[in-house]
Amino acid sequence: MLRTILISLLCGTVLTACSDESAAPAPLSPALEQGKAVVQGLCINCHGQGINNAPILGNPKMWEKRIAQGEEVLIGHALNGFNMMPPRGGNPALTDEQIQRAVQYMISLVPAS
């Protein structure tokens, strides 16, 4: 009986030690929250699955070379269209600021290398 209790306590301690409470994502700034809303409402349609070779959200391998081009280049691609992506992701009602924030949000999803 004592052995069972000790094993249970040990397992609980090990599992607690393995959990990382600090792994919770930091809260987003208001600007990134706005970008997230655009991404989830539109951009995810292609960037969620890589349709037409769109870089998949959060995929470092697919984003590395793109991010290296600089944020302004990526915003320009989003505003004006690039390859198979239409200007403004196909929604002409989006403002320049909304596009900028969506790009910044997508960049923020890529883990730092």
Image (tube, grey):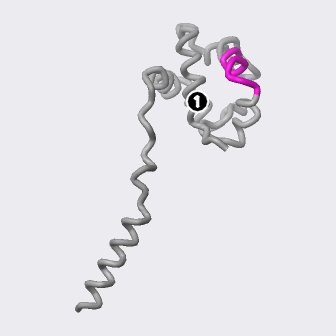
Residue at image mark 1: 106
Query: Hey, which quadrant is residue 56 in on the image?
Result: top right
Q: Residue at x 49, y 25 (%)?
A: 32
Residue in front for this viewpoint, 51 or 62: 62
Residue 95 point in image, percent of width and height = 54, 8
Identify residue type, mark 1: Met
Q: Secondary structure at mark 1?
A: helix
Q: Is residue 70 left or right of residue 97?
A: right
Across and down, in percent, residue 97 comes to 54, 11
In which quarter of the view is residue 72 placed? top right
Position of residue 86 in the picture relative to residue 44 (left or right): right
Give yes or no for residue 13 being in the magenta stretch: no
Residue at image point 46% right, 24% down: 37
- At which x and y percent is residue 27? 41, 34
Displayed quadrant of residue 4: bottom left
Which quadrant of the figure contains the N terminus?
A: bottom left
Give the prevailing secondary structure in the magenta stretch.
Answer: helix
Question: Residue at the location (71% across, 30% down)?
Answer: 67
Q: Which range is magenta?
A: 69-76
Q: Residues within 10 Å of mark 1 (few under 14, many from 20)?
A: many
Vertical position of residue 16 compared to residue 2: above or below: above
**Residue 84 picture location, percent across and down:** 73, 23
